[in-house]
Image (spheres, rainbow, N blue to C red):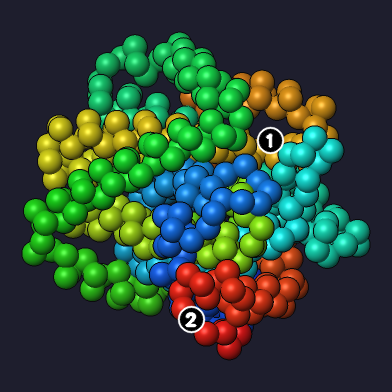
């Protein structure tokens, strides 16, 4: 019964209005900004590598670490398990709509993350707080505070670590040690949850800087090794790649009854794409708002690289490997990370499963670390800094529970919460878009930009 209620909730949230808001809003940002993040992508890379920015200004993190922290929340099971769930539910056509969501998400992230730095809040202790709730409160004013509260409440629901922890358990129980009875017992699940909570606590007790340091070291290494594995798997099945691309484009527009028709495939692709790269959801705004810079546009440009790395590159690798190995049609009953692992096992044998398991373990942990920070920011916004110190204990209890709950219920619950977060993020972004254009025009025509690029003033 609970599953039916959550299914109805997700169906309501991710209906046509949400498609219009995310896809239509992303299209608006792309056209209204005259492709700004695409035109200045080379400058974005320079900012990321530290060749441009001097690291001065308010905030806690460099541009690179802010992006690493944001990517640690997206580069993980959203790419490995989320893509597999999208393929299981929507077929190959869902991949096309994930790609479209990512392309539009480049501009969406530019606008929302620029606003995140523009309207971030500094408390009495000098700590910087940012996110869509502060964008709404300071950018739109008191009349819209209900939207800020809505984001924070939805964030507390959406940032539970249960999906990541649940999938880690699935890797151990069904893939690495299949058929071992005691690993499938509730005692093992509870024990694993407690052990994982201890490891998570060791990192989050160091605050955002420790999370960013860990993410900055692990995320590039794991993402790089995952892509090497994926490219090797595609090379081994090179003759099937053209046919896979053909099926992706054909299925995106064909009314396949198996997957509920075109609209159903679009909804699945857009919602899973949003779950993967979080463009328009607002989660990444909180990480990028901590960047140490006085130029909001700079962090917006760095943030715009996220959907390209996350969805267009990493998610595409996952989808293509699953499709070229043929496990989508053969692995009946498999879903999530189990399906992705079956694909790499088909490509490389048992070593492929073990290598992927190591990457899943590390990427899941970095996501769990970052989700703590996001949830903490929402908790502090709602209840204040004094009460916020207790959120760590609540979060660690959710890590333990994640090891024993149902995957279907958890994933649907998160998808629904993400939809709720998108409303305040996109509404504030659309209403405040002229402020971003003004800031962009001032930045690109100013000395600090031209001294590094030799470019003339932008025509924004």
Residue reaching furthest right?
143
Under circle 2, the secondary element is loop
Single out the residue that lies furthest toward the bottom: 459
Q: Which residue: 39% across, 37% down? A: 217
**Spatial CA span between label 1 and label 2:** 41 Å
Residue occupied by mark 2: 455
Find out whether the residues at labels 1 and 2 contact each other: C-beta distance under 8 Å: no
Q: Is residue 269 left or right of residue 434?
A: left
Relative placement, left or right, of 282 versus 127 is left
List the residue tagged with mark 1. Answer: 376
Q: Residue at x 12, y 41 (%)?
A: 348
Whether residue 333 appears in this view of the structure is no
Q: What residue is at 70 percent from the left and 40 percent from the top?
A: 377
* Of pointers 1 and 2, the one earlier in the residue sequence: 1
> Is the residue 185 above or below the residue 13 in the image?
above
Q: Residues within 10 Å of mark 2 (few under 14, many from 20)?
A: few
Q: Tell me where residue 19 appears, x and y as whole percent.
A: 58, 69
Q: Looking at the image, is mark 1 or mark 2 nearer the viewer?
A: 2
- Residue that appears at 55% across and 38% down: 370
């Amino acid at each position: 019964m609970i599953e039916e209620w959550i299914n109805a909730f997700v169906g309501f949230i991710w209906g046509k209005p949400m498609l219009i808001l995310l896809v239509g809003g992303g299209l608006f940002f792309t056209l209204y900004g005259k492709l700004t993040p695409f035109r200045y992508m080379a400058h974005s890379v320079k900012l990321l590598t530290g060749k441009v920015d001097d690291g001065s200004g308010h905030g806690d993190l460099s541009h690179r670490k802010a992006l690493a922290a944001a990517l640690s929340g997206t580069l993980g099971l959203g790419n490995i398990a989320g893509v597999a769930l999208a393929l299981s539910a929507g077929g190959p056509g869902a991949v096309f709509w994930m790609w479209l969501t990512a392309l539009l998400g480049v501009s969406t992230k530019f606008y929302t993350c620029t606003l995140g730095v523009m309207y971030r809040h500094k408390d009495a202790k000098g700590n910087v707080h940012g996110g869509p709730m502060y964008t709404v409160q300071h950018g739109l004013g008191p009349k819209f505070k209900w939207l800020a509260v809505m984001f924070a409440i939805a964030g507390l629901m959406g940032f539970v670590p249960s999906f990541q922890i649940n999938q880690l358990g699935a890797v151990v129980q069904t893939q690495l040690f299949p058929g071992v009875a005691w690993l499938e017992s509730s005692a093992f699940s509870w024990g694993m949850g407690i052990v994982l909570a201890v490891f998570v606590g060791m990192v989050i007790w160091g605050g955002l800087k420790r999370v960013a340091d860990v993410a900055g070291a692990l995320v590039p290494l794991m993402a790089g090794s995952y892509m090497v594995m994926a490219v090797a798997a595609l090379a081994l099945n090179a003759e099937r790649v053209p046919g896979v691309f053909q099926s992706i484009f054909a299925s995106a527009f064909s009314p396949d009854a198996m997957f509920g028709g075109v609209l159903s495939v679009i909804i699945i692709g857009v919602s899973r794409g949003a779950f993967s790269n979080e463009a328009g959801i607002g989660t990444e705004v909180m990480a990028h708002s901590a960047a140490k810079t006085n130029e909001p546009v700079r962090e917006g440009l760095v943030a715009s690289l996220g959907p390209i790395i996350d969805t267009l590159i990493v998610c595409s690798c996952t989808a293509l490997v699953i499709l070229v190995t043929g496990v989508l049609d053969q692995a009946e009953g498999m879903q999530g990370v189990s399906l992705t692992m079956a694909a790499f096992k088909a490509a490389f044998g048992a070593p492929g499963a073990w290598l992927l398991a190591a990457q899943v373990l590390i990427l899941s942990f970095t996501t769990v670390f970052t989700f703590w920070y996001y949830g903490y920011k929402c908790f502090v916004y709602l209840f204040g800094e004094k009460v916020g110190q207790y959120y760590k204990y609540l979060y660690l209890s959710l890590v333990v529970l994640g090891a024993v709950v149902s995957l279907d219920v958890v994933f649907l619950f998160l998808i629904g919460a993400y939809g709720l977060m998108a409303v305040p993020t996109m509404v504030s972004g659309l209403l405040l878009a002229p402020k971003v254009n003004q800031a962009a025009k001032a930045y690109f025509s100013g000395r600090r930009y031209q001294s590094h690029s030799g470019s003339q003033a932008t025509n924004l």
